[in-house]
Amino acid sequence: MRLSFIVLSLGFALAPLAGCKRKHVSVDRAPELPYPSCDGALGEGEVLARGHLRAGPLSVERNVVERFELRARDCLRVMTVRQEWPLNTSDLEVVYDAELRPLRAWKRMALPGASTPPDIRRYEPAPRGVRHAARA
């Protein structure tokens, strides 16, 4: 009975993944595109939101800490996030235009104390809605 409940729950959890109709292209290297900008140099900008989250007592991963910040930098909005827990550290930056459409996302994942280099990925919109993920 318990095993069938676990299998059924796993099936429901994975079902949305089967319906993903987006086309994803993964490449080893992508051309380096310039950082999105407005007409001039981007300053530090104005902080629109800032926060600090800690996992609650019912969370699976109880040691997760997240810090985030949303800034208005000229015509752009930039969200930066840092997640830390004993098994991983992740940094994320997403750049949006003034209408909050994503222009670029960058993520670095590292294992604390590991000798392997961090996994760095960059996501940028491409023509016809295709998004490219490149490992740096």
Image (cartoon, rainbow, N blue to C red):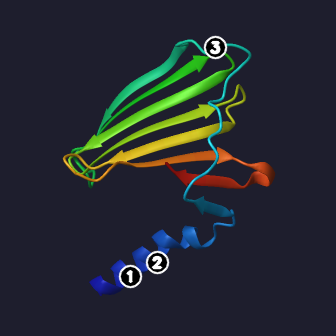
Q: Please tell me which residue lies in front, 23 or 69.
A: 23
Q: Is residue 72 left or right of residue 80?
A: right
Asked whether disc 2 touches disc 3, contact meaning CB atoms under 8 Å apart, the reply is no
Q: Please tell me which residue lies in front, 87 or 120.
A: 120
Q: Classify 10 Å Cα crowding around label 3: few (below 14), some (14-19), many (20 and above).
A: few
Q: Tell me what residue is drawn at x 57 percent, y 12 percent.
A: 43
Q: Amino acid at mark 2?
A: Gly
Q: Classify 10 Å Cα crowding around label 2: few (below 14), some (14-19), many (20 and above).
A: few
Asked whether disc 1 touches disc 2, contact meaning CB atoms under 8 Å apart, the reply is yes
Q: Tell me what residue is drawn at x 80 percent, y 53 percent.
A: 128
Q: Which residue is tagged 3?
A: 41
- Secondary structure beneath disc 3? loop
Could you give the CA–CA distance between mark 1 and mark 2, rounded to whole angstroms?
6 Å
Q: Which residue is tagged 2?
A: 11
The answer to which of marks 2 and 3 sits earlier in the sequence is 2
Image coordinates of residue 42 in percent, x first then y, are 61, 15
- Secondary structure beneath disc 1? helix
The answer to which of marks 1 and 3 sits earlier in the sequence is 1
Looking at the rendered image, the quarter that the N terminus falls into is bottom left
Q: Is residue 12 above or below residue 22?
A: below
Residue 64 appearing in the image: no
- Secondary structure beneath disc 2? helix
Number of callouts: 3
Asked whether disc 1 touches disc 3, contact meaning CB atoms under 8 Å apart, the reply is no
Q: Which residue is tagged 1?
A: 7
Q: Is residue 35 above or below residue 25?
A: above
Q: Amino acid at mark 1?
A: Val
Residue 3 appearing in the image: yes
Q: Is residue 92 left or right of residue 82?
A: right
Image coordinates of residue 55 in percent, x first then y, are 28, 42
